Image (tube, rainbow, N blue to C red):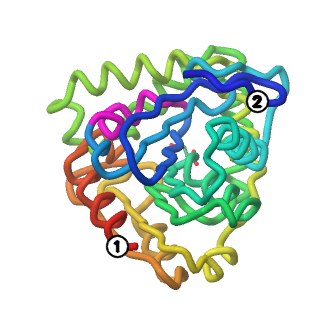
Amino acid sequence: MRAQLHDIVLAYDASGDGRPLLFLHGYPLNRKMWRPQLETLTDAARVIAPDLRGHGESNVPDEPYTVDRLADDLVELLDNMGLAGPVVVGGLSMGGYVALAFYRRHQERVAGLILAATRAGADSEAGKANRDKAMALAREKGVEAIAESMLPKMLAPESYPSKPGLVHELRHIMAQTPLNGVIGDLTAMRDRPDSTELLGGILEPVLVIHGQEDQLIPPSEAEAAFARLPNARLALVPRVGHLLNLEQPEAFDAEVRNFLRSF
Ligand code: MLT
């Protein structure tokens, strides 16, 4: 499906009935990463998975963007879908940065949050420098070079030999991301504000979920966020890495189902 926003078109999938649950993909991915949840969580929620601007089948802007812009796009999408009430906002990794921006800017639209494989803090100075290096790599060598550099860190080490189909699919999804999407994401992530202080004021229910073998964002980030959140549950999932919803959809879905039943 497609929604015309004020300046771009966003593509999205929606399936299931019940409470709206917005799932926001990570970098440099697109809504295809929510394929299992679009199929299996449909009895528990109305799962809505958009391609953020610059990704998948959504329009690719000429200019870089911010996490705030990505969050505001989602409010426009919900308005376009006639969903004026609060929704559960779930984001994985960069999607989690956008979910926190969504909360900061549109708290009245949030029924609950799912923070998956993400962190609340901003980039360190070294992290910001790495974003600039990645932008240079993308411009010089293309998005395929970004995909190749990210691929070995996306899953738990044991998932590479045991899930070749998933590895193949991931490489394909990442390499499809347009250059301006990669540059836009890296700019948005580099410049995102620190949300650590925000956490203590989030009274809505939050599920913090993280793979114990995440090679990109350590599980200690989930524990640190959980410690600050007043109304959260923490799920550390064994034997999975960064893309836990794809590596072990059953375990991920079970935690989400329990969470949705809890409020
Ligand atoms: C992601 O998986 O969305 C990104 O790798 C997160 C990041 O680079 O900070």
Q: Is residue 123 visible?
A: no
Quick check: marks 1 and 2 in contact, CB under 8 Å? no
Name the side, left or right, on which 240 lies relative to 243.
Answer: left
First to last magenta residue range: 28-39
Q: Position of residue 105 (x, y in %)?
A: 76, 60
| Quadrant position of residue 28 | top right
- Disc 1 crowd rating (10 Å Cα; few below 14, some 14-19, many 20+) is few
User: Tag 2, which secondary structure?
Assistant: loop
Rendered view: 190 above or below 118? above
Relative depth, front residue between 202 and 131: 202
- How far apart are the two marked residues, 1 and 2, measured between alpha carbons? 33 Å
Q: What's the residue type where badge 1 is placed?
A: Ser
Residue matched to label 2: 5
Q: Residues within 10 Å of mark 2 (few under 14, many from 20)?
A: some
Q: Which mark is residue 262?
A: 1
What residue appears at the point 28 percent right and 65 percent down from the top-left corner?
258
The residue positioned 51% from the left and 65% from the top of the image is 112
Residue nearer the viewer, 115 or 188: 115
Q: Quadrant of ligand 1?
A: top right
As for residue 258 lying within the magenta part, the answer is no
Q: What amino acid is found at the position of numbered circle 2 in the picture?
A: Leu
